[in-house]
Amino acid sequence: MPLLLTEEQSMLRDSARGLISDKAPVAHLRKLRDGRDAAGFSSELWATFAEMGFCGLLIPEQFGGSGLGCVEAGIVMEEIGRTLMPAPFLASSVLAASALSRAGSDAQKSEHLPKIAAGKLLAALAVDEGAKHRPAQIALQATRSGNGFKLSGAKALVVDGHAAGLLIVAARTAGSSGDRDGLTLFLVDPKARGLTVERTIMVDAHNAARITFDNVEVDADHVLGEVDGGGALLENVLNIGRGAVASEMVGLSEEVFGRTVTYLKDRKQFGKAIGEFQALQHRAAQLYIDIEITRAAVLKALQALDTDIEKAAAAVAVAKARAGTTATRAVQEGVQMHGGMGMTDQFDIGLFMKRARVCEELFGDANFHADQLARAKGY
Amino acid sequence: MSDLDTFRRETRAWLDANCPPEMRKPMTSDEDTFWGGRNAKFASEPQRVWFERMRDKGWTVPHWPKEYGGGGLDGEEAKIVRQEMAAIGARQPLTSFGISMLGPALLKYGTDAQKKEHLPKITAGLIRWCQGYSEPNAGSDLASLQTRAESDGNDYVINGQKIWTSYANFADWIFCLVRTDPSAKKHDGISFILFDMTSKGVSTKPILLISGKSPFCETFFDNVRVPKSHVVGTVNRGWDVAKYLLQHERAMISGMGERGVGRPLGQVAADSVGSDEQGRLDDAMLRGQIASFEVDEAALSAAAERMVDLNKAGQGHPAFSSAMKYYGTELNKRRYEILMSAGGIDALEWESPRSKEGARPRAWLRTKANSIEGGTSEVMLGIVAKRILDLPGA
Ligand SMILES: Cc1cc2nc3c(=O)[nH]c(=O)nc-3n(C[C@H](O)[C@H](O)[C@H](O)COP(=O)(O)OP(=O)(O)OC[C@H]3O[C@@H](n4cnc5c(N)ncnc54)[C@H](O)[C@@H]3O)c2cc1C
């Protein structure tokens, strides 16, 4: 498969870029942040996302989606990354939609997927618990009780969890923290008794929540996939999420880089454009190379996810690790090359730095994924 | 026992008896720093007590002459005070640009009258200073600054704009670079001048940083009258004073970051990341990054100590503070990247009480300025290439 976008994919990119750059430039995020918006994203814009078919991109056609793949989801994520648009696309249309499409019963799919595709239901995935992303160490306990389960524990960094109408919760039904087996995914109503959602205001002004479960009752038919066998499903869904976040970081890196190159041409010191100084030229050239290499690695991973997800893990680890280090470098160089200007809130570069930090932490940082790769290779 | 051993013993005992326990804890917020000045407020009673005791002993600036409120200590003694303070984690009783920047320049270039007027108010924390160097079009190319000072009788009349002036809105006085001879070559027409920020025609406008805090300002001068006697050094030779001051500023910035105090970084990381049965940090890559950071940090500490000793022995290179500024600030940025990585999800919260209102990410973002303020890393490397290595064309 050529590592290029097809004609249809390019058209998708153009339409996503058109909409997002027009309706959600960086000023859009700023306005939501400064206005302390209760939702933290624009529901009007989300409705437009649905009309354009983005919300159901990964959802099979029979459930109201367009049945496209990770490459297409990555295309939209990349555009989101360029303008730092806060939208429930990752949480609902990528993570939750993938989990439900892959493992949902017919009843579960018919109930939830059409609503997600229409942008009417926001679903979120609750995985992380500790400070670092360690899915094998999930400890939130689900114990059998009557015709179902009772969930107790806490989740953190639940992306868009503050606005979700449906939670997909990874819980432990067997084994103990550290075991890969013994995990189960549950569909949980956020209004259930014993469940508390705390919106957390994040450094990047994007949206997340901490959620606590105190003996939350869940019916047996709200198990997503198999009891005790959720680990493999979760890993696949996380890999899709990782590919998506890596794409977002590619868009973010390119945008920061583009703005920085423009500044190198415009800003004058010592009677010349600062871009005339070779010390900066070389670093800009290195960054360009870095981004190009990362872009290829990310597309490779997205294609691998679409071709055979069971064999995509290594490519995804490479993509997420690369995207993290590249974005980190891009934003650091961006601030540094803008001098004092780069340190001001009024200037956008800092917002990119903040978002890059959160993306790096989401679903495993560069260290985590390099370690995954080492393990996969047996050393 | 040598005199220095005795001095160390006495210093240790004095500090132990006089430094309140609260002032031996690592600083956690801006408020923990006492800056002095006309409008100074103490954040706590222990902060006041500690400041006053140190001031009365002359140890807000131990190595300045006693006549200016310093401790009159020589280099070795001052080092012992620093070491003994570090050993108990004692905070600086007073932080100010007067101490770290203006003071050294006044001691070298000031008239007797200027020293007597300004230095005692610095050691006593009575006047808070700010630095008026950078302008919108004169950052790295500082010598192209355009703020004008025109002669009018016994005064200069100053017009122009400065930017990125740290704490200008809290400062009582400014040390400022102005152009006194517009026809001279750019380095030759600059003077170094001091004036009161309450002078008519001075105004400031705070600028918000990416950390969400506002420690710096745009500073405007509209026909500000300043007596000519306030010029430090020779008129039109202000660049010499400015450069000398920058050496001290850079040495100060290179030492930022709480080197070697507080808990080891690896243990801070273990709190959130966890450790294995052997007590090793449960993230092999992060453990390696922290360990190599600590190697570099320990080596830099030695280099900082050696720089002071070399300077004292008259063997230091005047441009070496640029090398230290480069390394120290890049290292401090690395420290905070590690702290963010170690903090993971918990270090991404911006407002909750749990996160102390986002203390860690805000501090992390603030460190990004370290390699910009006081001259950028690129400018530091350029100075090393030119003045130490003498490379052609540099
Ligand atoms: C938090 C903070 C506090 C500050 N406090 C003060 C203060 O109190 N008083 C004060 O006067 N100033 C202060 N400054 C200003 C600071 O000194 C300047 O920001 C700094 O000198 C850089 O100038 P600039 O911002 O105009 O960047 P520019 O000079 O425009 O630099 C932009 C980029 O170009 C690079 N560059 C420029 N020239 C070269 C070259 N020849 N070769 C290679 N690269 C080059 C720079 O390194 C930088 O990466 C502060 C700055 C910050 C961020």
Image (spheres, coloured by chain):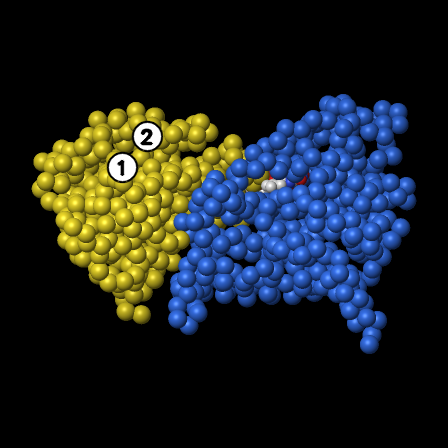
Chain colours: A yellow, B blue
What residue is drawn where x is 52% and y is 35%? Answer: A345
Q: Position of residue A235 (x, y in %)?
A: 23, 54
Q: Are marks 2 and 1 in contact (CB under 8 Å)?
A: no
Q: Residue at x 59, y 36 (%)?
A: B214
Q: Is residue A232 left or right of residue A247?
A: left
Q: So how many labels did they put on this image?
A: 2
Q: Nearer the viewer, residue A66 or B17?
A: B17
Three-letter code, disc 1: Lys
Q: Kindly report the distance in space between the C-alpha atoms of the residues bearing marks 2 and 1.
A: 32 Å
Asked if residue B134 lies left or right of residue A101, the reply is right
Residue B345: x and y in percent read 40, 49
- Residue B130: percent from the left, percent from the top? 71, 38
Q: Quadrant of the N terminus of chain B?
A: bottom right
Q: Residue at x 77, y 68 (%)?
A: B8
Q: Residue furthest bottom?
A: B1
Residue at the (75%, 65%) spot, across then down: B12
Type of amino acid at the residue the image marks with label 2? Ile
Ligand 1 position by quadrant: top right
The chain to which mark 2 is attached is: A
Percent of width and height locating residue B76: 78, 65
Q: Secondary structure at mark 1?
A: loop
Chain hosting mark 1: A
Q: Is residue A138 visible?
A: yes
Residue A20 badge: 2
> Which quarter of the picture shows residue B285?
bottom left
Q: Is residue B357 left or right of residue A156?
A: right
Q: Which residue is mark 1?
A: A191
